[in-house]
Structures are given as structure tokens and as C-alpha cells.
Image (spheres, rainbow, N blue to C red):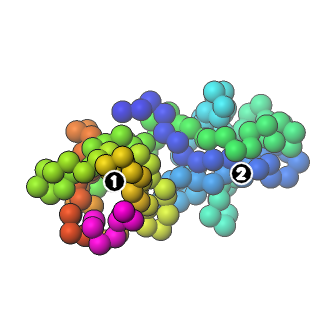
Amino acid sequence: MKKYLTIGTVLKPQGIRGEIKVMPQTDAPEDMKGFANVHIGGTEYRVLACRAAGGYAYLTLRGIADRNAAELLRGQEVLADRDDAPELPEDRVYIADVIGCRLVDEDGGQLGEVLDVTPAHTDVYTALIGGKNVLFPAAEGVIVSIDAQAGVVTVNRRRFNEVALL
């Protein structure tokens, strides 16, 4: 498993005092309040303040004192150390742990590999199947199980075929 988890993307500076607006890749923007440190562009920053509003997180970081410094972070991923991440309920996994997993059906038939997961109300998975990128939503009944430890995502073949953009 990866040491760092991607928890968001810096959208832009917010105001003139170095605060940054972040598009969270967590279940809720408030989840970002649990991280004491973040990594952006290879540099570790101490989180001095975090607030959530309108579906976004706003971070104030030690060492980012003004709008110009915040501007340099625009478009970069916000990473957090896995050890600092909150414990997930048993039926949940981090997106970083799903990427690279084998995609199989309930009979164990190999379909492909999970390349990416786009967070949304219903997450959208991108898988490499037969040399093509195939998109499918994590709609009800599509994903049967995710075993991040074993690196396997199991789908219901019938439901998968109904919703996948082949």
C-alpha cells in the first residue's frame, strides 16, 4: 500500500493571507480537518487551520504567508501520510488502495485492472480491459467486494455489462 494518500487538489489561493482552496478527494471536506500535516509538491506543510464550506476545504499552511506563495501551489495534489489518516469503517477503502487492483467477476474471471477512480456522488472507475479504457460507475450491485490487501475488485458481471461504457 502507498505511504501517502491523495486527499485533494489545490484549486487556487483564497484571499491575500496564503489560504488555499482545495477540492477534496475525501467523503466530505470536513474530513480534511483530521490531518495535522500535508505534502504538496514534495514539501511537507503543517496545517494551521482548516475550514469547510460549499463542498471545498480551505487550508492555512505554515510557510505559506501570502497570495503569491499560495499561487505556486495551484493545481498540485494534496497528499497526507497514511499513518495520519483516520481509520475507515470495515466496508470502506481509500481510493489509492484500489488503483492497480485486478478487476474480476464473481466467478474469478479476469476482466482487467483498475486505473483510476473519480470521486463523485457515485464514484466512477476507469479500468483497462482488453487494451481499452472502460468507465463504470460504482452503482448499486456493480461492485460486489473490494479486497485492497489482495489487490482485487470483484464485480457482478451482469450489472457491470449493463453500466460499463465499453
Tell me if 126 is positioned left or right of 45 in this view: left
* Three-letter amino acid code at the position of disc 1: Arg
Res 72 quadrant in image:
top right
Provide residue 17's location: percent of width, then percent of height. 85, 45
**Mark 1, residues whose alpha carbon is within 10 Å: few (<14), some, or many (≥20)?**
few
Tell me if 60 is positioned left or right of 8 in this view: right
Res 69 quadrant in image:
top right
Which quadrant of the rendered structure holds the C terminus?
bottom left
**Residue 164 highlighted magenta (yes or no):** yes
User: In this orientation, does residue 87 appear?
Assistant: no
Q: Which contiguous range is marked in magenta?
A: 160-166
- Residue ID at (34%, 70%): 163
Secondary structure at numbered mark 1: loop
Provide residue 151's location: percent of width, then percent of height. 27, 40
- Residue ID at (61%, 33%): 39
**123 or 39: which is nearer to us?**
123
* Three-letter amino acid code at the position of disc 2: Leu
- Label 1 and label 2: CA atoms lie apart by 27 Å
Provide residue 104's location: percent of width, then percent of height. 21, 51
Residue designated by label 1: 92
Residue designated by label 2: 11
